[in-house]
Amino acid sequence: VSVVRRRRCAILGASGYIGQHFARLLAEHPWFEPVVLTSTERSKGRTLGDVWLLPEEIPDTLARARLTTATPRELRRAGIEVAFSALPSGKAGTIETALAKKGIPVFSNASDHRMDRDVPLLVPEVNADHLDLLTARPGGRAAIVNNPNCTAAGLVVGLAPIVPLLDPVRVYVATYQALSGAGVPGVPSLHIADNVVPFIADEEEKVAAESLRMLRSARPRDARPVRMEVVAQCARVAVRDGHLEAVTIEARRRPSLPEIRAAWTGFDPLALWDLPTAPRPPIELRSEPDRPQPLRDRWAGSPRRARGMAVTIGRVRWDPPLLRFFLLSHNAVRGGAGGSVLNAELALRAGWLGHPVGRPPS
Amino acid sequence: VSVVRRRRCAILGASGYIGQHFARLLAEHPWFEPVVLTSTERSKGRTLGDVWLLPEEIPDTLARARLTTATPRELRRAGIEVAFSALPSGKAGTIETALAKKGIPVFSNASDHRMDRDVPLLVPEVNADHLDLLTARPGGRAAIVNNPNCTAAGLVVGLAPIVPLLDPVRVYVATYQALSGAGVPGVPSLHIADNVVPFIADEEEKVAAESLRMLRSARPRDARPVRMEVVAQCARVAVRDGHLEAVTIEARRRPSLPEIRAAWTGFDPLALWDLPTAPRPPIELRSEPDRPQPLRDRWAGSPRRARGMAVTIGRVRWDPPLLRFFLLSHNAVRGGAGGSVLNAELALRAGWLGHPVGRPPS
Amino acid sequence: VSVVRRRRCAILGASGYIGQHFARLLAEHPWFEPVVLTSTERSKGRTLGDVWLLPEEIPDTLARARLTTATPRELRRAGIEVAFSALPSGKAGTIETALAKKGIPVFSNASDHRMDRDVPLLVPEVNADHLDLLTARPGGRAAIVNNPNCTAAGLVVGLAPIVPLLDPVRVYVATYQALSGAGVPGVPSLHIADNVVPFIADEEEKVAAESLRMLRSARPRDARPVRMEVVAQCARVAVRDGHLEAVTIEARRRPSLPEIRAAWTGFDPLALWDLPTAPRPPIELRSEPDRPQPLRDRWAGSPRRARGMAVTIGRVRWDPPLLRFFLLSHNAVRGGAGGSVLNAELALRAGWLGHPVGRPPS
Amino acid sequence: VSVVRRRRCAILGASGYIGQHFARLLAEHPWFEPVVLTSTERSKGRTLGDVWLLPEEIPDTLARARLTTATPRELRRAGIEVAFSALPSGKAGTIETALAKKGIPVFSNASDHRMDRDVPLLVPEVNADHLDLLTARPGGRAAIVNNPNCTAAGLVVGLAPIVPLLDPVRVYVATYQALSGAGVPGVPSLHIADNVVPFIADEEEKVAAESLRMLRSARPRDARPVRMEVVAQCARVAVRDGHLEAVTIEARRRPSLPEIRAAWTGFDPLALWDLPTAPRPPIELRSEPDRPQPLRDRWAGSPRRARGMAVTIGRVRWDPPLLRFFLLSHNAVRGGAGGSVLNAELALRAGWLGHPVGRPPS
């Protein structure tokens, strides 16, 4: 792969949890170079080091970068070519639209545009072709591309290879979601210490709707449509990072267990794309009786740059018509910043961001 | 109710977590008087105070009671009329059988006999008539009566009133189980701090089998048999006490939501029995968006003696044919010692332990 | 003790953590009757049940009480005779002064007036005579009486009986402070999960200054002045309730260890006062090698009404001139609402709130 | 530095927590090559991957290494040149002695020999010359070299540069120790969830004795002897890794605060040695108000190989004669396996393990 140059990018909402994961992932990214970090008025002028929240190390190259409150117009003037949005849902929508109108494509973690008809809701391993939605846009306009909700992000990676095999009636999901999903200040410690909270606002609806949108768009020309439901129950547990999901599928078809396992282990749709943040393989199947676990598996993913991007699956039990398993993914990486970075890599490689990088797969 | 005298009872395995909950519940019980506490050789001769594990206060009257290693024969000689067993599963079976043969009825939390054909697996609110199994026993023999697995115990209370209404195809349960379910030493802190462990040995099988056994026995003469499956996924979370369960039911029938709620709130099958440890009502239905929670709801239950015996249900969502809710019960009280105490109360009141206490309900 | 009637009282800031402990302690108090609960504009009109934060049960009698935003004048008109203040420090000062000027005595947990010369900083077991400061006030004015900082509150109870014996040079304290000390939202869960935070704003200064003020005022006519320093290092740990303190004293005198232990166990300065919330004894000395522990000892204190008011001391090691021990007290009860309730009881009993209750000790 | 070859080494007790940190640190070590991993009979024949406990990734090169129960004789025959001991204290002593007699030098984390007169108790930054004790041994015998207790290890690094400046009377230490200090199974989760346990067997004695032994041996020819006490209070908190220590020093001398800070920041006694696992600098001084924190600072240390080896100091307050600060170090790295690896590097470099590596500093 020959990369002519790193695209100048902005991280919007860089003082928050997802924003800082963007900073961590982009600081030494081969294709993108973060040159503007925005935040709210409150943090303006402080360095990224001053507001660093993550237990992971701050990247040296960004520790002294100053937070700004640049407008879309100022970002345009600053020569920003790509924006990564970690803006809070609710506030993100209008800013992202404004940027797109100014010709700056936005890769967003916010939920505002996720269900918009002309916005790809993208997990590259699952529905890479969803980028084609962008062709529907009138010529001059740039794009908004969304990564999904943090729970849906891991789920669809686990479902994508087996949905065609199983033709599910329903997918039942109960979640054990990490604290970082709510950011900082997020969940007060007195709410969650020695406790589980069986409620996360709008989460169950998002998981259902976004998962279906992605799985359906994954197979546009497929003879058999996705005719299933996703039924979620979501709870918050006292874990720092890593969403665990208990998944039970009622299937219409009855493949063998080895076929199911092979569908997961052989799943590698990005094999030819050579994207820097793509985990290879995207699914790690564990055979131990007690995995996946947030503590041990949240950073799954290789190569090194793709740590936290793999989805781990374990405890697979197949009693037709029911398939049960546990699935884990890092909510702030695969389910957040890393998802959008991977989306941007796919978009760049596929030629959506000006010049394609290297040669796209045939 | 007139109670002639407190029955002399033994607590088997009194040094463990469930054993100590037995001590707490029986110390000042109106119908039972703990006079012997047994333990392993290792703790023999120490006082209950020396080995006290619970954060709850030790009852004054038992703090100086000495732990013994009495045999069934010695318990017989000591005039023990009832035994409460918190013996570890695996070791409990033969001891409990020996006691029953000596004529001492055993109310057990151990799993060894739970699926025996002639042993009632009893949750009084659910299948009080299961005690009738004891009539099948040859005359001289006393009884073993089991409370179920800690997860199944809460679940069946929540299901009992709605199963006839919904006629479920399947009940899907994902659990968030507390540390005390594994006792002490139990779960090493390094296994669970900042983590969830999606595995508890044999738990999913027990939840399914025991729940069905109880629900089926609940309705022996009913025209419509229970024709459903229970499908469980069990995980351990870093919570001290209180098992939370995410329940999704696929129903064959479509009652209204008010009918479902009324079935729960009107459920009070022990109303006439006047059992000291029976929570009235047995189910507390919460309307807040984020309940039940282990921290806030594990001690639900009134009157005071029945704290920890009520089952709390919340977040009820009815999208026919799917009913979703969260359910919580105190695993060591409702799902452990308290369950067996309530079983013994029912047995005594119903005349199975010699003389009936007061008048049984007509 | 004959109590003519319960004094009508207001709880200021009743929607917060300390405010709700006031509600819990006063709901069925024999001498005080909470008739007004105030909160900020935001919670106005909601019931106490709507905003209940504590894992402890809400008192039935207050669950439906509505929160108001009553001014001092309105409280006066409502016939309020005593106010308990759980207002946030910083905002509390002017409101408390206004109430006192209106003739309503205020028992406050806020820090604003703690170091005011004419405001008693009171822990009844330690410096009951500090109430005499009130005599200095011009006739018509009512009083503000403060309980100290939550860490200092437990510390001075543990120090009071031994300071005269040891004549300390310095008291070194390192703290392990609970989450509830910061209220809700308080400490974000992502700041403290799997962590210790070695900083609590202004805490070390308060512990030193307030402890000395109380210990000095405890012995006004004593020949030997308190000539010691208090040196604190304060940290927050992931514990819900209960401040643990590692105390090391460098002593000038060398009593025997039995003398030291006897000073603690024999300490009962409120023996004659018959105050409802006074723990008897105020200090519980543990001999186990691993106590006190927040989980097990935070609710120490009898009778029942005084749960959480006793200070637990353990691991006493005396290597002259150094005395080491650990000390624990419930930060929100002894170190918060309970402290002020006890102060009000003392004040009422001593005749400062109109008519004395019963007969004061001679 | 030219290294001819990697020394063949054994890791004793490789299935435990410290043993696995040895494996992690040595797997790709430039000077040592782990070729034998021993464990108890119970784990014999299993792979390191089968028993892996750490949340950190297992090194690829050792994942399939089989655990053995090799005797000292067998280790000798296998050509083992160096042994790293993570054996449990109590059992370690005789095995380590046997190995040393067979001519295999042992770098040990066990406490058995730490206070032996002819065994160096070594922290290279503090008392590198303690290795000279080995010259006292009769010619043929190899060495045992110990790293200290996990709490003392960090403490002495923090004290070494300032003890000469301050000439302390006493060092008061209160600790907040991590769960991994007790290994697995170690602390039961029910003992520590929502709790602090103010007791760790023998810990306070070890911290005092070992710290003094090291600090005294650090300055053998110094005019002014170390005439101070170390006074510890040790507690366990619910943190996975990283011992935090609240340190208060009573000083005889009064340097300026900048002098104290400079002593820490300028401390780099291993600058010339070029040891692979030496953190440079060994002390990281933080200026934020709320650092060090276990979560954020336990992995301090650069270069990459030295992660977890630096000691972090913060919240420095100097009110002569009292210096207060918090100090943090990774108990299982700096205070465990990493300490012994650094010891072995120093010994090798200094010529104690056959041929010196490269040129020793002049």
Image: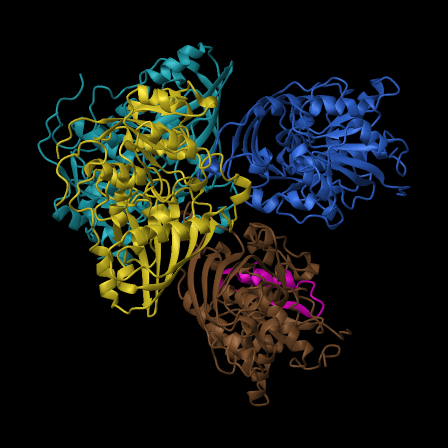
Chain colours: A blue, B cyan, C yellow, D brown
Residue A269 pos. (x, y %): 77, 35
Vertical position of residue A314 compared to residue D93: above or below:
above
Residue A182 pos. (x, y %): 58, 33
Residue A243 pos. (x, y %): 58, 36
Magenta-drawn stretch contains C220: no
Vertical position of residue D93 compared to residue B270: above or below:
below
Which residue is the extreme one toward the bottom?
A: D138
Magenta-drawn stretch contains D33: yes
Q: Is residue B71 visible?
A: yes
What residue is rendered at 84% in x and 30% in y? Answer: A76
- Give whichever of A151, B357 is nearer the camera: A151
Magenta part of the protein: which range? D18-46
- Judged left or right of residue A259, residue C224 is left
Q: Is residue B142 visible?
A: no
- Give whichever of D11, D229 is nearer the camera: D229
- Judged left or right of residue D145, residue A213 is right
Vertical position of residue C8 compared to residue A51: above or below:
above
